[in-house]
Amino acid sequence: MMVWLIWLVVFAGCSNNAVSPEDESLSQVMSLSSLSKSSLVDAQGAVVGMTVSVDVINTGPVSIDRAFVMTWKLRDSQNAALATTTHRFAGQPFQPAERRRVILTMSFAARPNLSGVQDVVTFAFE
């Protein structure tokens, strides 16, 4: 019986079917790379937004075949939310080691600079 169980686990691991991880592990298998940010400045020189360009990589061992959302938040030094935006991944399965370029634009109330601003990025299934 134990040999059958081990063979079943090995066989299931070699399957070509995509397996979707649980919500809490999705953020663990997604990685960010090649991050660049540009400030959006108004005519008075105040920062009123940001454009973020980033590669999202599936570092997990399996394809992610369900639609999911990346949420990008900006917070100030007091942890207050400045801006939030999302990007939806759907359509094609996200294969292991696959890299997808994402560009996000966020606007917020004018501020003199981005000192103390922090990024918070999460991933969740729809």
Image: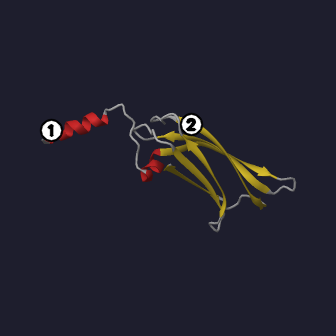
Q: Residue at x 77, y 55 (%)?
A: 48
Mark 1 or mark 2: whose residue is earlier in sequence: 1
Q: Which quadrant is home to the N terminus?
A: top left
Determine whether the residue tagged by mark 1 lies in a helix, strand or loop: helix
Expressed as whole percent of the image width and height from the top left, the position of residue 80 reads 64, 66
- Cα distance in 3D space between marks 1 and 2: 40 Å
Residue 92, placed above or below residue 114: above
Q: What residue did someone put label 2 on? A: 100
Q: What residue did someone put label 1 on? A: 3
Expressed as whole percent of the image width and height from the top left, the position of residue 104 reads 66, 45
Q: Is residue 73 left or right of residue 3?
A: right
Residue 27, placed above or below residue 110: above
- Depth check: 17 or 111 in front? 17
Expressed as whole percent of the image width and height from the top left, the position of residue 44 reads 87, 56
For badge 2, the amino acid type reads: Arg
Expressed as whole percent of the image width and height from the top left, the position of residue 42 reads 83, 53
Q: Residue at x 74, y 50 (%)?
A: 39
For badge 1, the amino acid type reads: Val
Question: Do the numbered discs 1 and 2 sit on residues whose CB atoms are within 8 Å?
Answer: no
Determine whether the residue tagged by mark 2 lies in a helix, strand or loop: strand
